[in-house]
Amino acid sequence: MTVWAPRAGEVSLVLPAEGRSIAMRAEVDGWWSAPALPPDTDYAFSVDGGNPLPDPRSPRQPRGVHGPSRTFAAGAFEWPAWDGRDARGAVHYELHVGTFTPGGTLDSAIARLDHLAALGVGMVELMPLAAFDGDRGWGYDGVGLYAVHEAYGGPAALQRFVAAAHERGMGVSLDVVYNHLGAVGNYLGVFGPYFSSQTMWGEAVNLDGADSGPVRQFLIDNALRWFADFGIDELRLDAIHALVDDSVPHLLAELSERTEALAERLGRPLSLVAESDLNQPRVVLPRSEGGFGMTAQWADDVHHALHALMTGERHGYYVDFGSLEVLEKALTRVFVHDGGRSTFRKVTWGSPVPDSVGGHRFVVCAQNHDQVGNRALGDRPSRALTDGQLAIEAAVILAGPFTPMLFMGEEWGARTPFQFFTSFSEADMGEAVRAGRAREFGSHGWAVVYGGRVEVPDPQAVATFEASRLDWAELDEPRHGRLLEFHRALIALGARVPDIASDDRARTRVEYDPADQTWFVMHRGDVAVVVNLSAERTAVPLGDAARRAVLLAWEPVDLVAAAVELPGHCVAVLGPAAD
């Protein structure tokens, strides 16, 4: 057993089951050591005679984030054969373990993997699993970064889930949060200088200050452990723009280098996908070109351009979005804000994406946990859009030039919301979260969006969590089944049609009606995705329509001379006619 506590005068290993403590031996560079413990042994550390605290690298927290740690033999698991899966181009499916199934565990989620495999998912993306206070939460306030949240089944359940996904040909992505830790149960500061400053979410991690070397290694070891011990194929790195690091190399570049070395050793691809608000291509550029070397990054501007166009929302950060001109830029240039002024931010923002960077370097979506859950009511687009409009969104995302992602239930037009929920054990923290959410949604035009006064759901209420569970019974309803089959067909089409599978952004162009903005065509090489945005039947001009074949359509369409006639709120995917 080892622990890093560079400023401690003494450290003890506490064994609560035996009612005794063992004095640990001081090693070099602030490390302390004691004999190894058998699997499934509870333990804690006492620093300078203080209360027993969980291990900063605790693999399990069976009694919650304030209780003792428990050892776990990660290497005992027998893995099925698996060649791996690269993140680029794979259809991602983001899910929250607690609300994905009625059981709310990793084991119960295994029973739904066949549904995802039949859908055509290539990468199952799990929202954060790091141990956090309480049973219910999104996971972005984790404090036990090495542990798997016990309410979800703990670390053994994660291994079973990953193995089951691999057996069905799907990779697994894990969302990890390295820019801050939660406020409840965060004891790292007792052990050493893990933190540098305060952020809007919590204490920022010390990446470039005094004694930051072991802190950086703490995070890198954490990332590599998910790959090596749990079979994870991809890490989604939360909000990298909040990583405060002036070091050379940057933490992300160092992590990229170490991940590449591990991938070579393991003999399978390992991916790093970054969430970034900066609109900077540096994130995915190679380290040799001064980049961070990430496999891919989230591109929120594509979501914003599509969502604002389809819903008409213009509040908050949607203020610069909503026209077909903006959608064209998002689909061809990735970043809408790429060096121009951002009205919402009130500053010049972003940089252009070089033409040499392929589309699969960017993960895009019509829904995700942020864009649904951080709405005042956690409502999905299905609240406001017709099924035909949902089909349009699906076609743009799944047949576009990027790496597509679906949010759980999106494939059948789920009507259940995904609201923000917590279960903090400390009353003061719970009340602070309630007040914060109410204050946050008192602006940004939510009353206009919903047509009246907004009552923000109580994050601490069990009812808020329960309302966010997927209702799988919806699949028995014809309208939901039809949307599911359309999503399946779109994904299958992308797998077999090279022009759709391509990430060559130069072969993507957009035509649209600049006058009344009622239609547009997204060209992917020789494939045309034709969209009627209006509720009325519309003839969309397409010069070679007579030489086209309908590959897929939401409703029956007619190819008439140099146009495609579509019913209202309809999309059709056209390819060259067979000879």
Image (cartoon, rainbow, N blue to C red):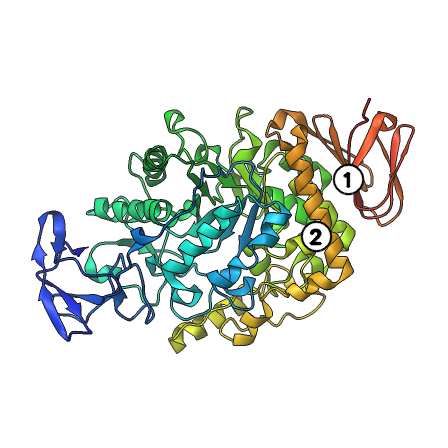
Q: Residue 153: percent from the left, percent from the top?
A: 41, 64
Q: Residue 163: percent from the left, percent from the top?
A: 44, 50
Q: Residue 446: percent from the left, percent from the top?
A: 64, 62
Residue at 54% across, 56% down: 95
Considering the numbered disc 2 on the image, is that residue within a helix, a strand or a loop?
A: helix
The answer to which image quadrant residue 447 occupies is bottom right
Q: Is residue 374 above or below residue 247?
A: below
* Furthest residue toward bottom: 427
Q: CA distance from mark 2 to mark 1?
A: 14 Å
Residue at which label 2 appears: 484
Would residue 168 be visible to someone looking at this image? yes
Task: Name the amino acid, label 2.
Answer: Leu
- The answer to which of 161 and 272 lies nearer the viewer is 161
Residue at 56% across, 68% down: 102
Residue at 87% across, 40% down: 557
Quadrant housing the N terminus: bottom left
Q: Is residue 501 above or below residue 24?
A: above
- The answer to which of 545 and 494 lies nearer the viewer is 494
* Furthest residue toward right: 561
Task: Name the amino acid, label 1.
Answer: Leu
Q: Is residue 309 above or below residue 262?
A: below
* Furthest residue toward top: 579
Checking the image for residue 552, the label placed there is 1
Would residue 374 be visible to someone looking at this image? no
Label 2 environment density (alpha carbons within 10 Å; few <14, some 14–19, many ≥20): many
Residue at 41% across, 60% down: 157
